[in-house]
Each structure stands twice: as C-alpha cells, then as structure tokens.
Amino acid sequence: YTFNTYMQTLSNNFVSSRLLTNTMINSDNSFTDPIYYVASEPLTFDHDVTFTNCTIYCAYTDYNDIDNTQWTVEPGYTITFENCTIKSGCPDRMWKGIVIEGNNSATQSTSTHGMVDIKQSSVIADAMVALKSVEGGIIKANNSEFRNNQCDLYFDEYGNKHTQTVVRGNTFITLDGGLNDHTIHPKNHIHMNAVNGIAIKSNTFRNENIDADISKWGTGIYSYSSGYVVSPRVLSGSN
C-alpha cells in the first residue's frame, strides 16, 4: 500500500463525495461546496436548484457519447448559478451544455417554462451549446461570462414572445488558442431561430483567437426570422 495508492484513494474519495448525480441533485436544492464533479450521466432537474460559489467540472472522465454530459431543466423549474464556474474537467474535451425546456403553447412563465438564472460573475465554458432554450425556455444571463463555447446562447423556435428572457452585461469570448477540442470551431455567440422579444443589453463580444483562419472565428449574433433588441454598453462619462 504505497503513498501514491493512498493519495489516489484520497482523491477518489474526494471526488465521490462531490459527484453530482441525479440521485444527489434530487436530494437537495442548494449546493455550496467549492468543487463538484459531474458523473457520466445526463442530469435532469425537476425541482429548483441553486449553486453558489462553486466550480463544477463536467466531462471530467472520458466518455463515448457527449449526450451523457447534457443537463436538462424541465418546465416549471429553475437552476440558479451565483458566482459559479461550469467548465470541462478534461483539457481536450467539450461537454454538451444545458437545455432549458419550455412550453410552446404557453406564454413565458416560471410556472410553465424551465429557467436558468446565471449571475454574479458566473462562467460557463467549454460547452457545445452553453445554454439552449427550447420552446421558450427562459434564460436570464446577467453580468457573467461565456467562454470558449462553440455556441453560447441558442434560442430555438418559439411561438410566443420572450417576455422573461434577459441577456445583460455579459462577456462572450473566444480565447487565444481556440476551443478545447481543436477539431471544432466557434459558431455563434448568440443564435436565434424564429424567436421574438429577446433583450440583449450592454454585452461585450470578443474574439482573441485572431491567428485562426477568419472562416473559423464564428459570429457574434446570428438570427433567422427573429425579432430582438440590442442595446450598447454605456461607458462612464458618455452621454
């Protein structure tokens, strides 16, 4: 029983005690430990959950199917991130991202739609699609950072107006060196497909990977058959 074996055992025990599984998230609604690891299984949130001051490592072990790294928020429930970082636990792998389910036949409401509320300098990194709104799933993104994702926010077709969704004061950035998986490249920071009413206020879009071929830079905002309002940042001292 060597020292290395002992240290590996301690490491395994530490990870096990902070391993996010469906059983674990269903047993609590508040997570405040500084570090969590996500098990190799899709996570489904069917009650309100808040993460506070956490770093969460997704895809920290190898996987055969990236769908096993997806999180899903069901209609009527909310995940809140307060000063959290959610990122890949493997330096050369991406994770799927978070899908927020809504209800195409209902106007936006937290009682009928899932919601992700990300704020207080939180970060989502290394995802294929960081946050994906389906049938009007609500995204409230305030003063946070979306870093090195293939797509940051994806709004899929929704028959009603996005009255609750707000995208305010965030930084959308691709760093020098590109994404974790160098075989894929950024697409759109914000993608909108047949949606209406989204407010995009005082955000920053940056690409620092300028050595890449321009065709691989990606796009700031892409929209198809959509209505939305983009407001600029107001600098101190500006009129």
Image: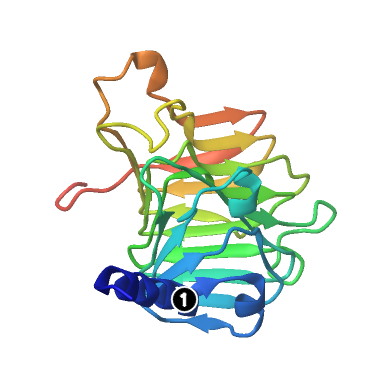
User: Could you tell me which secondary element the residue under label 1 belongs to?
Assistant: loop
Q: Position of residue 71 (x, y in %)?
A: 61, 58
Vertical side of 86 occupied by 132: above or below: above
For the question of whether residue 142 can be seen, the reply is yes
- Residue 184 placement, left or right of 179: right
For the question of whether residue 48 can be seen, the reply is no
Residue toward you, 129 or 163: 129
- Residue 160 placement, left or right of 228: right
Q: Position of residue 222 (x, y in %)?
A: 53, 29
Residue toward you, 49 or 139: 49
Q: Residue at x 40, y 49 (%)?
A: 90
Vertical side of 132 occupied by 113: above or below: below
Give the quarter of the figure containing the N terminus.
Answer: bottom left
**Mark 1 burial class by Cα count in 10 Å: few <14, some 14-19, many 20+:** some
Vertical side of 212 occupied by 113: above or below: below
Q: Position of residue 194 (x, y in %)?
A: 69, 35
Q: Quadrant of residue 157?
A: top right
Q: Residue at x 33, y 40 (%)?
A: 173
Residue matched to label 1: 18
For this orientation, the residue located farthest to the front is 1
Residue toward you, 6 or 38: 6
For this orientation, the residue located farthest to the right is 105
Number of labelled discs?
A: 1
Q: Quadrant of residue 29?
A: bottom right
Q: Residue at x 66, y 79 (%)?
A: 26
The amino acid type of the residue labelled 1 equals Arg
Describe the colour scheme in one phrase. rainbow
Residue toward you, 146 or 108: 146
For this orientation, the residue located farthest to the left is 237
Q: Residue at x 44, y 70 (%)?
A: 36
Q: Position of residue 168 (x, y in %)?
A: 42, 54
